Amino acid sequence: MKAMVMTGVGGVNKLEYRSVDNPVPKKDEALVKVLYCGINHLDLLIRLGKRSGPKQFPHILGSEIAGELSSGEIVAVYPWIFCGKCEQCKSGNEQMCNSGGTVGRNAWGGYAEYVAVPKRNLITISKQIAQKASAIILAGTTAHHLVRRGNIQDKATVLVTGATGGVGTLVIQLLKLKKCTVICATSHEKKISLLRKLGADRVVLVERMVEEVNYAIDLVGGDTWSKAVQTLGKNGTFTFCSTSKEEIGRLDIGNAFAKQLNILGSTGGNREDLQAVLQLVQKGVIKPVINAVFSLEDAKKAHERMEKQEVFGKMLLKV
């Protein structure tokens, strides 16, 4: 089969389009013919060596897979590998499985014509939403879990940082379903109008985040994380899945104590999160923002665009 193979850690030159052997599924796995694969910021971080990744090369990236089984059934692949037996899995946190991993990170992913994945990770979808599904499998699951974990109430005012990526554009839509007032913070002035069109009630530059809010969701990390925490009022809730910045987020502990802040890390999401967001896409309630669709052999171009922060929404590979 043809695949975009990662040959090592480093620049886009570490991605190579070549032929490799078809994966042979194990007893509990299914062979999926990849139709679309979403390109996630995680892919970029793994390639650059900024996140733990494969132990050996060559490796195939890609965590957001929509594909077809030999039976003709169209499926979305839940991206977190899980055992189903440990304490985390039994409590509904499959994404935090004690012996788990991630498709495209710890196992070969969807930058290829075929992928072998655990059967328990398959969710049947309609062919009509296959492309849209690949834009929300990891990003949408993460977004849904962020909003749910923060227990964000209807009609609340919510600050969202880093809202122009795949997760952020979906967070905005999920919050608008709850009739929330959404304030987006960005460091890119040219993206202000795009955020407003997507539903943001107000857009501010990161350095001007001063309004006091009850809820904040951070998707950036680092200094932006630190500034976003400071916007919370008493009993405010801060939910984050921010890992893209290298600098350390800082917290005024005295301020957090005095305001009785709720600070919640949010890792991925479980199968219920994915199923919920897929249903919203099927109903047309959630509309993934697709920036561009590339052929498999052009995955390097997509990575280059992401590195330059030229993306609003999701980029996909059509296999």
Image (spheres, grey):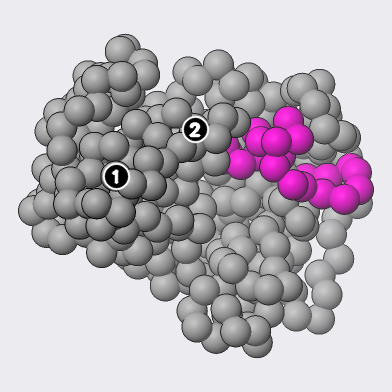
Pick whichever, 220 or 223, lies toward us.
223
Label 1 Cα crowd, 10 Å radius (few <14 / some 14-19 / many 20+): some
Residue drawn at the location 57% of the way across and 51% of the way down: 64
Query: From the viewer's perspective, is residue 182 above or below residue 285?
Result: above
* Side (left or right) of 104 relative to 196: right
Q: Position of residue 116 (x, y in %)?
A: 75, 63
The quadrant where residue 225 appears: top left
Q: Which residue is mark 1?
A: 255
Q: Position of residue 302 (x, y in %)?
A: 60, 25
Query: If you read the primary sequence from the N terminus, does the residue marked by circle 1 or circle 2 appear first?
Result: 2
Q: Which residues are magenta?
A: 39-60
Residue 278 in view in this figure: no
* Side (left or right) of 2 relative to 83: right
Which quadrant of the rendered structure holds the C terminus?
top right
The quadrant where residue 264 appears: bottom left
Front disc: 1 or 2: 1
Label 2 Cα crowd, 10 Å radius (few <14 / some 14-19 / many 20+): some
Pick whichever, 163 or 120, lies toward us.
163
Pick whichever, 240 or 163, lies toward us.
240
* Side (left or right) of 202 relative to 283: left
Instruction: Please tell me whether mark 1 sits on a helix, a strand or a loop.
Output: helix
* Amino acid type, label 2: Gly
> What numbered label is drawn on residue 286?
none
Q: Position of residue 276 (x, y in %)?
A: 35, 67
